[in-house]
Amino acid sequence: MSKKRATEALQRLQISIPNPAVELKHSSPFELVIATILSAQCTDQRVNQVTPLLFQRWPDPAALAAAAPEEVEEVVRPTGFYRNKARSIQACSRHLVERFQSQVPQTMEKLTSLPGVGRKTANLILGECFGKPGIVVDTHVGRVARRLQLTDKQEAEEVEMDLQKLLAKKEWSHGSSRLLLHGRYVCLAKKPRCGDCALASLCPSAFSP
Ligand code: SF4
């Protein structure tokens, strides 16, 4: 049943969200890695306000790794937790320079060896930058998946494993992006917009999440 519901849900979301674009602006894998680290506890819109200046001043891993920490902190300050984030993006850049010749690696194992990069970010990079299947599980994807009863897990990695069993591999990247956008704009945490939801007729939580 879950598999059928998952397939039907993704077919419907394909119509309502034909282009599930990543909302973090980027022009390279490096920029998406850094923008994603900055997006923790922050909106994509806010991150998009600081990254143009950040990448103009420090356009590659070597430049960002060598920057004065207090200057990086100042630029990323609007994204919150700016000291930790500045430290994290500089450590990540240093790691890219020292271990990967300044290139963002293309495997889960190597990506998650980067400071500040977990499975969520790694899956995003794999799908968005390298066309490799990856299920991104953030708070939105987890919530939508639970409301659709595609999983009963809370931990992101366990949700990812459940979704891997239900979704065709070719759907992993775009499918999870669609679930994410659906959660961000329709299946809201506090007041889900079930009346406007394309999934309402198949959702076990419709009108009573
Ligand atoms: S019907 Fe409501 S609870 Fe179910 S996916 Fe849609 S918005 Fe979320």
Image (tube, rainbow, N blue to C red):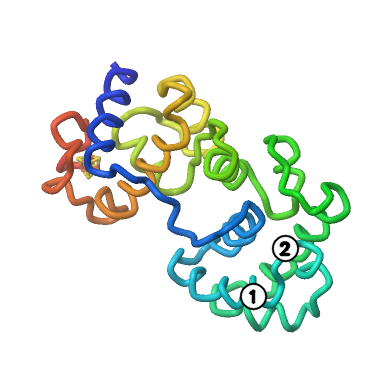
Task: Pinpoint residue 32: horizontal percent, then vertical percent.
Answer: 59, 56
Q: Residues within 10 Å of mark 2 (few under 14, many from 20)?
A: some
| Mark in front: 2 vs 1 | 1
Amino acid marked by disc 1: Gln
In the rendered view, would you say 86 is above or below 159?
below
Which of these two is toward me, 192 or 109? Answer: 109
**What kind of element bears circle 1?**
helix
Which numbered disc covers residue 123? Answer: none
Which image quadrant is residue 207 in?
top left
Task: Pinpoint residue 56: horizontal percent, then vertical percent.
Answer: 64, 75
Specify which label sits upstream in the sequence, 2 or 1: 1
Quarter placement of the N terminus: top left
In the rendered view, would you say 163 is above or below 53?
above
Quarter placement of the C terminus: top left
Alpha-carbon distance for marks 2 and 1? 19 Å
Name the residue at the right extreme: 98
**Which residue does the numbered mark 2 point to in the structure image?**
88
- Horizontal side of 166 relative to 182 (left or right) equals right
Amino acid marked by disc 2: Ser
In the rendered view, would you say 99 is above or below 152?
below
**Which residue does the numbered mark 1 point to in the structure image?**
56
- Residue occupying image coordinates x 34% and y 45%: 19
Whether tag 2 and tag 1 are in contact, CB under 8 A, the answer is: no
Which of these two is toward me, 108 or 82? Answer: 108
- Residue occupying image coordinates x 41% and y 21%: 166
Query: Ligand 1 is located in which of the four quadrants?
Result: top left
Which image quadrant is residue 71 in?
bottom right
- Horizontal side of 207 relative to 6 (left or right) equals left
Which image quadrant is residue 108 in?
top right
